[in-house]
Image (cartoon, helix red, strand yellow):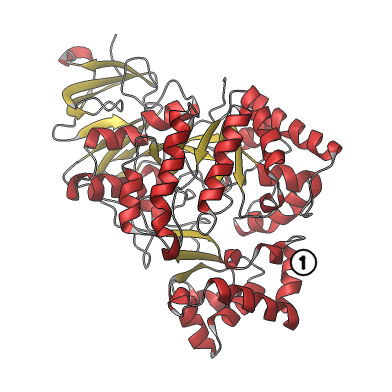
Amino acid sequence: MTADLILRGGTVVDGTGAPAYRGDVAIRGGRITAVGAIDPCEGPELDVSGMVVCPGFIDLHAHSEFTLLADGRAWGKILQGVTTEVSGNCGLSAVPLLGEARRQRAEDLRDLGLTQTWEDFAGFARRLEDQGIAVNFCTLVGHGNLRASVMGYANRPPDGREMQEMSRLLEDALKAGAWGLSTGLIYLPGAYAETGEIMALARVARSHGGLYATHLRSEGDQLLEAITEAIRIGEEAGIRVQISHLKTAGDRNWRKLPDALRLIREARERGADVAADRYPYTAASTDLDAILPAWAYEGGRAAELARLKDPDTRARLTEEILASHPRRDDWERVLIASVRTEENRSLEGRTLAEAGALRGCPPWEALYELLLEEDLQAMGIFFSMSEENLREILRQPYLMIGSDSSARATDGPTRQGKPHPRTFGTFPRVLGRFVRNERLLPLELAVAMMTSRPAARLGLDDRGVVQEGKSADLVVFNPEAIRDRATYEDPYQAPEGIRHVFVNGSVVVRDGAPTGARPGRVLRKGG
């Protein structure tokens, strides 16, 4: 059978962790039809000699549910070799989006030029497919969405009816093709949920073969307790557990890594199915108001803003914040990544310490004023992790790579602020810095962490390996040239060394440049 295209003469790293070998790869009808030595008469060819041919990278931890709707080009992902994304992480997803959850999210959608037209997973998937996307898209169901859709931002346990409704909404999305449940237990309303509530929903996800991915209840001072809780949920609910962006946040907590890894190792030795993902950077990124104590968020956005305006409440906030951030350099480790207003645009890329100096006030007061002026819509980058710990985490046998970022482009509605450089650099950074330069990982293992491991973790049977009959999601890169270029000062820089990227057999990156093709699909569990 004649191929649509033959990738000729490359080094095949098949994604399984097996040794690389010289071979050709044939593509036809969106699938890999042959691997190995292929007759020259079988079809048109692309010379990839000197290049690595491997499966398309699967970003197991992404946040693109809304940015893909705003701009389906997904340049930041395809230019680094990502062909499939898993969104809906950290308790936030596109569905369900009802009641208070819908009202809370409306402003974020407006900032991207979007309005909500979907009522359920099927409607969201149709809208995404109708507009066209360059990458494949999978989603988890966010616990924060479930809770806020049913009971708003109330700080209390759900009653029987509310628990039943959350379970029904979760089950509806799982039946329609969602891949599991996620929690964000430092965010609202997830922070209000007790372990039993999460466990009950995890059992619903397990009954549909789903995964449980969790942004732990603490990644710093209570890290070990939070890992213990996640493992308990997995063992008692009988569900696979994915610890999101495993880290030890805050230098006083760096020493906890051996104990954290021991807890995971012992659970795995008992037979618990626990794994983790991580991005290859030592700075995190989330909402700037994450610095505030959890009680400040209670009741939703309007209530939080009211607290920030009240002098007595601000005094209480300051006392608690300074107790946990007592050093001046704590404020030098927080960058303002993005704001909404033009008046504050000059603060993007500056630290909170700098913002305070510019305003002639302490950095915490600058934080309060900024949150008020931006209606809480400000993002931060937090330098809180250890390079040594990052290397140790990357060496774990259950570790996968996830960018923890949304799909963006260098122009258009998704170019906003100065996002974390992981948005454009995650996967090339692993291959350039940690594989080629530092030799922390062998190439074959690193590729497996980005391909077959996340595919198996998710249950994505037809992707993640270069094998006859599999979907033709492929990356061709120069192992001697691949590197990330995105920085904290200038994050909108594409990596080097990624030559060609194929999604479902169609080329989305040719000679390092996007083609404009949008062959991506919404991948549904069981579909």
Left/right of residue 161 with respect to residue 202 in the rendered view: right
Pointer 1: what residue?
Answer: 303
In this rendering, the answer to whether 126 lies above or below 368 is above
Q: Looking at the picture, which amino acid does disc 1 mark?
A: Ala
Please tell me whether mark 1 sits on a helix, a strand or a loop.
helix
Given residues 519 and 241, the one toward you in this image is 241
Residue 272 spot, x, y in % from top left = 50, 29
Q: Is residue 191 visible?
A: yes
- Residue at the spot x=16%, y=45% of the render? 480
Left/right of residue 6 with respect to residue 327 in the rendered view: left
- Residue at the spot x=27%, y=25% of the render? 14
Q: Which residue in the rendered view is the most extreme toward the bottom?
A: 360
Residue 494 spot, x, y in % from top left = 33, 53
Residue 95 spot, x, y in % from top left = 67, 40
Given residues 104 and 382, the one toward you in this image is 382
Left/right of residue 180 with respect to residue 19 in the rendered view: right
Q: Residues within 10 Å of mark 1 (few under 14, many from 20)?
A: few
Residue 259 spot, x, y in % from top left = 42, 48
Given residues 36 and 271, the one toward you in this image is 271
Q: Is residue 475 visible?
A: no
Left/right of residue 451 with respect to residue 407 in the rendered view: left
In this rendering, the answer to whether 8 lies above or below 449 is above
Quadrant that contains the N terminus = top left
Quarter location, residue 19 = top left
